């Protein structure tokens, strides 16, 4: 997992509620650190319509 995500990727999460409503959250520069950082998750700038 670290090898795939150590260079930075975009994380996109699509959500759907039980009532059919939908939303999304997107983070630029999604990175998972190495073992020495305990695989720390770093998220860049947020965009989306959830969590506001």
Image (cartoon, helix red, strand yellow):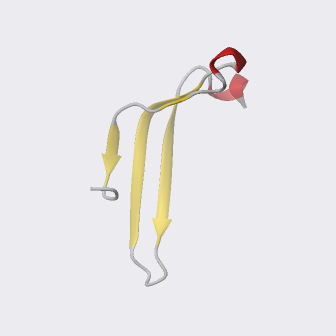
Horizontal and vertical percent position of residue 5: 63, 28
Q: Would you place residue 46 above or below residue 33 in this image?
A: below
x and y percentages locating residue 27 in the rendered image: 42, 39
Screen quadrant of the N terminus: top right
Could you tell me which residue is drawn at 43 percent across and 84 percent down? Answer: 19
In the displayed structure image, the side of residue 44 where residue 39 appears, left or right:
right
* Percent of width and height locating residue 28: 42, 33
Considering every residue shown, the one lying at the far left of the view is: 52
For the C terminus, the quadrant is bottom left
- Horizontal side, residue 48 vs residue 26: left or right: left
Look at 34% across and 59% down and name the residue there.
50
Q: Residue at x 63, y 19 (%)?
A: 37
Quadrant for residue 45, please give it.
top left
Q: Quadrant of residue 26?
A: top left
Task: Place residue 36 in its image quadrant.
Answer: top right
Nearer the observer, 3 or 51 = 51
Direction top: furthest residue: 36
Name the residue at 34% across, 41% down: 46
Residue at the far bottom: name it. Answer: 19
8 left or right, relative to 6? left
In front: 33, or 49?
33
């Amino acid at each position: 997992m670290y090898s795939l995500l150590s260079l930075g990727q975009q994380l996109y999460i699509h959500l759907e509620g039980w009532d059919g409503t939908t939303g999304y959250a997107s983070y630029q520069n999604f990175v998972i650190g190495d073992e020495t950082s305990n695989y720390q998750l770093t998220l860049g700038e947020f965009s989306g319509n959830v969590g506001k």
